[in-house]
Amino acid sequence: MSMGYALTERYPIDDNCKPTAKYGTLGLFKATQIPPEIKAIVVEKPGLDLANGAIGIGEITSIPTAPAIAEAYYQLDGERRFSLPLENTPYAKKK
């Protein structure tokens, strides 16, 4: 989710916050494109009356991902990137 936001996803909206692109053109990663080193870890906590005792899976981990990837590219090539999705990466789509 957050890797796509940082590297490939474009979600254009109009002045009323209505999406202007079709879902298939957003640039979402396919499951087969995610590095195999990334694993989901579900931590169950007994006593919570929710599915698997889970609360808020994923959203909080999305916050630091884009800046971390931008910093990794900066360390790689010395170029600062300030817009999302990040430009001048192997993942960047041609405009």
Image (cartoon, rainbow, N blue to C red):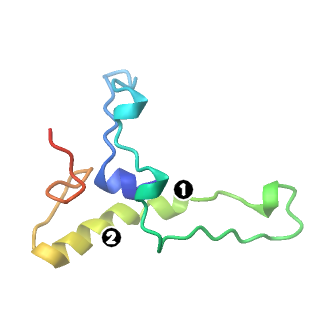
Q: Nearer the viewer, residue 8 or 48?
A: 8
Q: Is residue 47 left or right of residue 25?
A: right
Q: Residue at x 20, y 59 (%)?
A: 90
- Mark positioned earlier in the residue sequence (2 or 1): 1
Q: Residues within 10 Å of mark 2 (few under 14, many from 20)?
A: few
Q: Is residue 44 above or below residue 24?
A: below
Q: Nearer the viewer, residue 38 or 43?
A: 38
Quadrant of res 41: bottom right
- Residue sitting farthest toward the left: 78
Count the marks: 2
Picture coordinates of residue 89 (x, y %)? 18, 60
Q: Circle 1 sits in a helix, a strand or a loop, which is it?
A: helix
Label 2 is placed on what type of residue? Answer: Ala
Q: Residues within 10 Å of mark 1 (few under 14, many from 20)?
A: few
Label 1 is placed on what type of residue? Answer: Glu
Q: Circle 2 sits in a helix, a strand or a loop, which is it?
A: helix
Q: Quadrant of the C terminus?
A: top left
Tell me if label 2 and label 1 are in contact, CB under 8 Å: no
Q: Which residue is mark 1?
A: 59
Q: Residue at x 25, y 74 (%)?
A: 72
- Residue sitting farthest toward the bottom: 75
Q: Is residue 58 left or right of residue 54?
A: left
Q: Is residue 62 left or right of residue 56?
A: left
Q: Residue at x 45, y 56 (%)?
A: 32
Q: Residue at x 87, y 56 (%)?
A: 49
Q: Is residue 17 left or right of residue 51?
A: left
Quadrant of res 20: top left
Q: Which residue is mark 2?
A: 68
Disc 2 and disc 1: Cα gap in Å? 16 Å
Q: Is residue 76 above or below residue 54?
A: below
Picture coordinates of residue 35 (x, y %)? 42, 67
Picture coordinates of residue 75 (x, y %)? 18, 78
